[in-house]
Each structure stands twice: as structure tokens, then as C-alpha cells.
Amino acid sequence: MLKKYAVFFFIFAVLLAFVTGCTNSEESSNSQVREEGTDNSAKTEKKSITLLYSFASKTIDPHQDFMGVRAGIAETLVKIDQNLEIQPWLAESWQQIDEKTWTFTIRDGVTFHDGTIVDGEAVEASFERVLEVNDAIAANLKIETMEASGQDITFMTTEEYPSFLSELVHTNTSVIKIDVENISEKPIATGAFQVVDFTAEAEIKVEKYDDYWDGPANLDEVTIKFNSDGNVRALALQSGEADIAYHLPPEALAPIESSDNLRVESVSSLRAHFILYNANKPALQDVRVRRALDLLINRPVAVSEIMNGHATSANGPFNRDFAFASDEEPKQYDPVQAEVLLKEAGYERNAEGMFEKGGTVLELTLATYQGRPELPLMAQYLQAEASSLGIKINIVTVENIDSYLWEQQDEWDLVTYSVLTAPRGDGGYFLNVAYLPEGSLNPGQIDIPELNEITKQLNVTADLENRVVLQKNAVDIIQEELPQSFILHPHIIVGVNERVKNWTPGAEEYYLITNQMDVE
Amino acid sequence: MQRVLSIIGSRCLQLVIMVLVLSFVTFLLMKVTPGDPIRALLKVDDVVVTTAEEERLMKEYGFDQPIFVQYKEWILNVVQLDLGESIIAKRPVFDMIMSRLPATIALSIGGLVALFLISVPIGILGAVYEGRWPDYLSRWIALVGASIPSFWLGLLLIYFFSLKLNILPVMGKGTFAHYILPSITLGVAMAPMYIRLLRERLISTLQSSYIEAAKTRGLRKERILFFHALRGSLIPLVTMFGLSIGSLLGGITVIEILFSWPGMGELIVQAVMQRDYPVIQGYILIVGFLVVITNLVVDLTYLVINPQIKQGKELG
């Protein structure tokens, strides 16, 4: 009797759980139907899409977070276009008066989301705020004084600073209205969309701003959601919960590629994955050893096997679409030549087949980190290639790579690393931070006098053509001296529902939501 | 009543001691492990900065001070109910945590409901059919539940219910339907311990003398099971809940991140990655507070479930 009741109780509980589950799901599917219903009936008036992004925003203060520009809320004075060249945006034109003085003319008819007009003074106020709240931007822009007059804003920099223009592409230099409450959740700016609601680290809802200076957006509403799990992003795209899903893992693409109503966009990013050599280590101070290691990198195999084809082989630090990138083909895999170079450098094979010099085996510590899952794979791949040639590589995986590289400089010989090498359409940034001895991204203590000279010259060269020539020279030296071995430029992989029109992802990843994008 | 007051008093004392010890240990650990917020802050922005500039910022934020000085500063502010400001987001830590806390608590409750619906029937089944196939089935369910990683279970649930059946949303928070998948994931992750514990306790309670007495008095077996045995067997489960509230709040992080649940999960994971000390410390403080409060509630619940304790007797 007791057992019978226990069984009944169990079945009842399971049924109860199931029924509540079903009712809820019915409710939800009903509500979905209802939503769709309202969508259908109101299709002529409400067009909306959902974009799914990987890095969550804690704040959407455009002076602190990239989402201000990404979500189409805020805009900068200048932007970079598909060809990665600088174009007018809020500023219709600009003029360099002298080495330190720049005047920008703001377009007529630009208004903030509350209707107030954007003039030189409003821009000045916005810049005053960013210099106050964002230390990194303040250090980077080097603004000494500003002066507004009518639609003009004049910046005087503390030093000769030709790349000032390209630094204004930085999304944190957006022009926003400053005398408003709650900028971190509801910034008022000039973009095609204005904020309706923001839940930190979860979602942003924006709606069309009717008086947008470049013509009102085709879409009425956009929802941007964050999810840091690549597989969930892929599932959300397939279930129709998202129309655009960023940064999909290559292994999750098959069902999206085979679907009739979804497509995969894969664009070369401005990022480079590379091996950085520690210039303090005696073995690696010999350029022949660095070259030998470089010859062990099989770039086409890394692209096809590790990146599933979603990458481009690198021939230097910069995306090959840039005018200032190298024209040479990426280096070929050549273990035979690597062996020749090692022997030239004085290494001989010992009884175990390992290379040694003066009784010391060539043994290197390769640091890597999980932040980008492909980097440890590249480390293992290099380890295997080196081992078959006769170089022992020990891999260490660290959690916080930047701190490790700086604080344990004696411990590592090489590291798999990844940097946005030209985030604002100019290579000056990377040349300064990664190669100058005082650069903040130079834990390997690279110091190549010839290269430092060019970088310093670049820092005082305004003419764009001359800048291209100087940057090309810098790339040539880098490829000759090999302070790093550039492997590939990973692609930005985006899954898109076919109903989204007039939209492709850009290499810069700044302008995700535009007034042009539309849905069927 | 005296008993209630003494429980509250001892818990408050415990709270103060725990907060001091916990906050100091985390403070120490965070400073010892590699990583600093200044580099994270600058890296976020991808701008040209020199190492000299980094050092200037380290100074400005006081990170060059000895650790005891930094801790003293922090604890003095905490006493004045000021948890400081996030280094990365530049927003008050208290506001940041409080805006996420309700969602985490809501999901915890959802998880507990799922836990109850899963573990009680299966636990009862295991006890009543001790040594027979339903018992093995319950054991098997507990084993699978204990072995399956939450994130994978979550992905499987999303795959079946959102993609294949298309009846539940993939992620986010909004309608009641949004609660179902994350709650089940959380409930399944916690259930195995409770299933096993309930089964063991129920088996031994059913053999105890007062149940025998009830049987001889001719009470119906189902009444004995649900009104007498089950009530007695629930006490260790309540104790266990008090003990596992900490691990619940830890485990919920993975589920929140998977389902884009706007709770404290993403906040704390990002804060740890970026070494945003004020946020980490604030989180530890508030979670520690919650754990103590929950244990207090659990202690007081005993008084309701088992009147023996009212008379000051400890449980055997």
C-alpha cells in the first residue's frame, strides 16, 4: 500500500513538474505567438533586430565603453571606412593649422537625442569630460587646450602629434551631452539610435532617433544582448532569438552554414596572433635563432587546421588591406633552412638529437594563455615542430598573461600573444607601444635603434603618404629583425540571419548598428 | 525566546568576525596573485601609453602603498558603509552589486524550487523501494546529476528546449519561461546530495521506534510516510541547505553566464579577470553577509520543524 502511494506521489510530482513546465512553455510559446502576432500586425511600423555580442558592458557611458558607438548611440568626430581610411563623421572637415593645432568643423544640423544642437562648445564640453573621467584617453590625446567658436572646435596638443586625427577614431572620444543624469545607463548622444533601457552585462535596448542628421534609421528598434558563451550564441542564432551573433566558434558553424536562412560572414580583423621573443634571453638575441623558429611556423596549416580557415596568414603586424602593410608574401615553412640557420648560429646536435651550444641544450619556455583558445593550440603546434627539429620547448599556461610577462620577465623565452595592431587605421599605435623601450606592450624589452628612429620620425610626420612610407619601412625592419613572428590575422566570425539587409561586419568592429541596416 | 535571541546574537558576532577574516584573506590573495587593474584598464582602451604613465596611475589609485595601508583604507570606508568605486566602470560598487543581486536571488529561488521538485520525489522513491529497481534508478539519477557539468547540461537543455522544440527562450530574463531552463540546470546540479541524504534519513526514520509505534497504533502507512517520517527527515536537508548556500552562490555564476542572466555572475567574473579589487571585495562582503543571514534563517527554521531544539536539546 505504502509503496503504491509512493509511486503515485512520484508520478504525480513528475506530472506536476511536467504540467507546470508545459503550461509555462505554452504561455511562453503563446506569448511568442502573440509577440509575433503583434509583430505581424504592426510589421509596417515596427522593424527590429537582436544582435548578440560576446563582451558584456558594465556601463554604456561612451567615454568608458565601446558599446556607445557600437550600438549606434554615440559618434566620434571622424571614423574609419571599409577601406580602413579616415573619413568625416560628426566633423565635416578639419584642418591642421600648425604642428600642434587642429581645427574641426562640426556638421550643421547635428542634434543630441534631446534635440539640443551640437556646436563647437558642446564638443568642447564633451572632450573636457572624457579627459576627466578616462585616464587612458587623456594620456593618449595629449590635449593642452581647446577653443570653441561657432561650429568649430580647435585642439592644441602638448606636443607635435600627427596621429591625433586617427586617435579621434577611438570610440571613447564620442561626443555626448554632459549635463545629464545617469550617463552610464542612458547617455544622450548624436547617433541614429537612442537608449530605451540598459541592463548592465545583459542587454541594451535602443530605438530609432527620428531627427538623426544622416537620415532616420530603417530599423525602429535594436536589442543588443551579451553572452560570453560562443556555443550559446550560435544556438540563439539558430533558434531565431538573435539575428546577428558575433564571434562564433569555428566548430559551431556547420549547422549555420547549412541552414537556408542563416549565413556566416568572416572578415579579416585588425588583430594579429604572434609569437613574441624575449629580447633579454641570450639564446634569442641571435636573430638566426629567431629566424629558425619563424621558419618552423606553418602559417597555411595554422589557418586551415587551428582556425578552420577563418584567418589570414600574416606577413607582418598589420592587416594586409592596409596601405602601410607589407607587400611581401608570408614566410614559408622551411625546417631544412631552420636547421642550417641554427648550425650557423653555432648549435650542434647532441647524442639525443637535440641542438646544443657549449654543452647547453637549446631549451625554451613558451608561455601561453586560455583567453583565446587558439593560442595554446599554436603553442603546442610550435612545440611539436621544434621538438622534431631538435629544440626543446616547455609550455607554461598562465592565467593573467600581461602581468606574468611583465613581472616574471626572467622566466619566459617566448609567448603566444595577440594584439589589435592598428585599431584606428594607423600603425603608429602599435609601433609606439610594442617596440619603443618604454612602450606599455613591450614586456619582451624589444629595442631596435633603427626601428625606434623610424617610430620617432613617424610621431612627427603628418603627411599621410610619408606616414605610409615610414610605416612600411618599419614593417620591413620588423620582418628582418623578427622581434616577433607574426602568424595570422584571425577573422571576425559573425552569424547573420538572411532577413538582415544592408549590413556586413567591418574589420574595425566599431560600427555594429547603422542607420542603413534593415530587415525584410 | 531567549534561545532565539542567543542564536541571533551569536550569528551577528560571527558575521563581524567572518567579514574581517574573509575580506582580509581575499584582499591578501588578490594582491599576491599576478595581475593589476591598471593594466586591465589601459588594455581595455587600446591606447598608446608608456610604462611611466602606468606607474603614475598606480600611484594615483594608491596601489603602490603597502598592502596593510590599502586594506586599512578599504575597511575604514566599509565601516562608513562605502564600498568604493569600480576601477574599470567608475561606478559605485554598492549600486553595481545591488542592481544585480535581485536577479541572482530570484534565480536561486527558482533553483531551489527545481531542487525540491527533483530531489524529494526521487529521494522518497529510493527509500520506499530500498534495494529494488526504483532505488537503483534514483541512485543512477543522482550519479548522473553529480557528474554532469552545469554548463554542459545547460547547453543540452538549450539545444532541446529552445532549438529543437522551440518552446523556451535561450537566454535572458523577462517572462516566467526564462526561469525554467536556468532553474532546472541549477536544481539538477544541487540535487544529488539531497536525494541521497533524504533517502538515507528516510530509511532510518522509517525503522525508528516512533514510526513503529505509529504503525502499531494503526495509522495509515502513507500518512506515516508523509506526515511523520518525511518531516523528521527534512531537518538534515535544511542543515545541508544552510551549509551549501555558499556553493550555491558559486555555482550559480556559471549558469548566469551561460543564460545571460543579469545577476552577479558576469560582474564578478569580469572583476576577477580585470582585478577590479573594489568590486571583488564588495562582492565577497555582500555574499558573506547573505550566507550568515541564511544560516540564521536556517537555525530559526529548526525551531519550527523540530520543537526539541526549543528546549535547548541538540540534535543527535
Image (cartoon, rainbow, N blue to C red):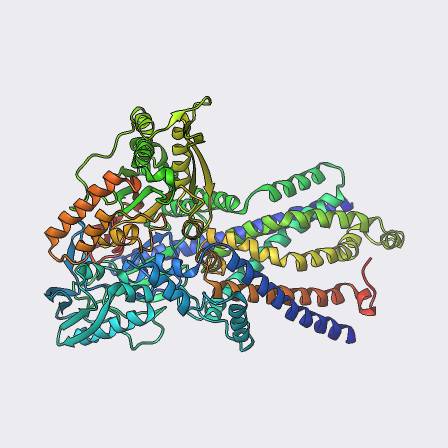
Check the image and report above or below for A356 versus A162.
Answer: above
Q: Give x and y (percent) for residue A79.
A: 19, 58
Q: Is residue A371 left or right of residue B246?
A: left
Q: Which of A429 and A499 is in front in this view?
A: A429
Q: Nearer the viewer, residue A66 or A201?
A: A66
Q: How many labels does the image show?
A: 0
Task: Report if residue B177 is visible in the image.
Answer: no
Q: Residue lying farthest front?
A: A358
Q: Dividing the image into 4 quarters, which one contains the N terminus of chain A?
A: top right
Task: Report if residue A51 is visible in the image.
Answer: yes
Check the image and report above or below for B57 versus A323.
Answer: below
Q: Residue lying farthest top?
A: A351
Q: Residue at x 51, y 69 (%)?
A: B70
Check the image and report above or below for B11 versus A393.
Answer: below
Q: Give x and y (percent) for residue B22.
A: 60, 63
Q: Give x and y (percent) for residue B123.
A: 70, 47
Q: Give x and y (percent) for residue A486.
A: 29, 40
Q: Residue at x 21, y 62 (%)?
A: A168
Task: Report which quarter residue A255 is drawn in.
Answer: top left
Q: In this view, does B301 lie to the left or right of B260?
A: right
Q: Nearer the viewer, residue A75 or A38?
A: A75
Q: Nearer the viewer, residue A512 or A78?
A: A78
Q: Is residue A73 left or right of residue B272?
A: left
